Image (spheres, rainbow, N blue to C red):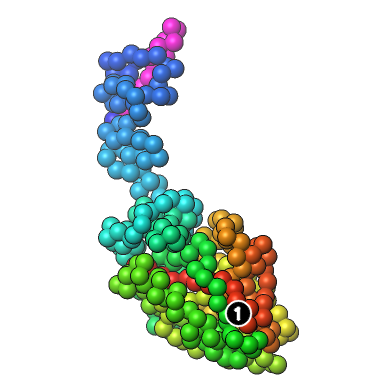
Amino acid sequence: MSTKNIVPRADGEGSLGTAAKRWGDVQSKKVTSEGEVSAGSITSTGAITGASVTVDGKDIKSTLLASNAGAHNGIFRGKYLGNALTEAQSAAIQAGTFEDLYIGDYWTINDVDYVIVAFDYYYNAGDTACTTHHAVVVPRNPLYNAQMNSTNVVTGAYVGSAMYTTNLNTAKNTIQSAFGSTHLLTIRQLFQNSVAEGGYENSVGEWYDATVWLMNEFNVYGGLVWKNAYAGTNWRGNYTIDNSQYPGFALDPTMIHTPSRNAYWLRDVASSGTFADVNGIGNCSRHNASYSLGVRPAFCIK
């Protein structure tokens, strides 16, 4: 990158190469190594244009920011990405560079905002390791309301619920229609499939193929609130790969409680007749399994 010094003079002007301009103009001008000053931005052989910074034709973000999940998980941007996942966006995800994609960025498809909340959260996790780079996406608001079970029981925990077997199907169809089946990533998830200790303690569970699923308390809060709350010290069933908060909820906690202020289900058993949920007013809650609350699932795209 070529540079030349600006030499201030007593009359308030300075020189840059062969050009001399008033110092007060520089902030709103374009300064080049050849001495040009014009409206716009500052450049060496590249340019600064709005939020885009380039040096020698390269985006300076690529120099200062690593092109990987760790870097992109630490920046909340919240940019509108369009009304469909583009091939360029898909390629950036599959390459693991996540170029021009950040936490909080979203697509609006059929009036639903789909928000990126994590990158490569499940990478190398699972009884069969996930080795596909991915973005974790959650709708900004629940897609619809449904019951966990038709009565206030938690038999079979999450896997045994009507939500898992039937009531999540509409969400799966909606998400597949929005992103296409080729862009949805199926991962191996450790889901609870039984309860013990009076019907409120989650079992360890088993591994299942999963494409769309309800979040758990770890995903949203970063810790447990209601899950196993009545199980004393015998906390089985906490051995999940969903064991930390999605970056989207950490960087912008307002995403935990939705703009629509609808309560939505989490998959954790809270007691003998209740599952955990996020209340419409934002607090950690639990409701009877027969309540009809929001369905706000997570899924991975590639």
In this rendering, is residue 180 above or below 66? below
Residue 294: percent from left, percent from top? 56, 71
Left or right of residue 49: residue 70: right
Task: Judge whether residue 138 is colored magenta.
Answer: no
Q: Nearer the viewer, residue 129 or 254?
A: 254
Q: Badge 1: how crowded within 10 Å, few (<14), some, or many (20+)?
A: many
Q: Looking at the image, is 123 positioned above or below residue 31?
A: below
Name the residue tied to disc 1: 268
Residue 27, image x and y in percent?
43, 24
Residue depicted at 67% across the width and 81% down the height: 288
Label 1 residue SS: strand
Q: Does residue 250 appear in this view?
A: no
Span of residues in magenta: 3-14
User: What amino acid type is highlighted by mark number 1?
Assistant: Asp
Identity of the residue drawn at 32% across and 22% down: 38
Coordinates of residue 116 in the picture (x, y in percent):
45, 61
Point 36% across, 57% down: residue: 83
Instruction: Tell whether 222 sits left or right of 298.
Output: right
From this viewpoint, is residue 13 visible? yes
Q: Residue at x 60, y 79 (%)?
A: 268
Find residue 113 and report its image quarter: bottom left
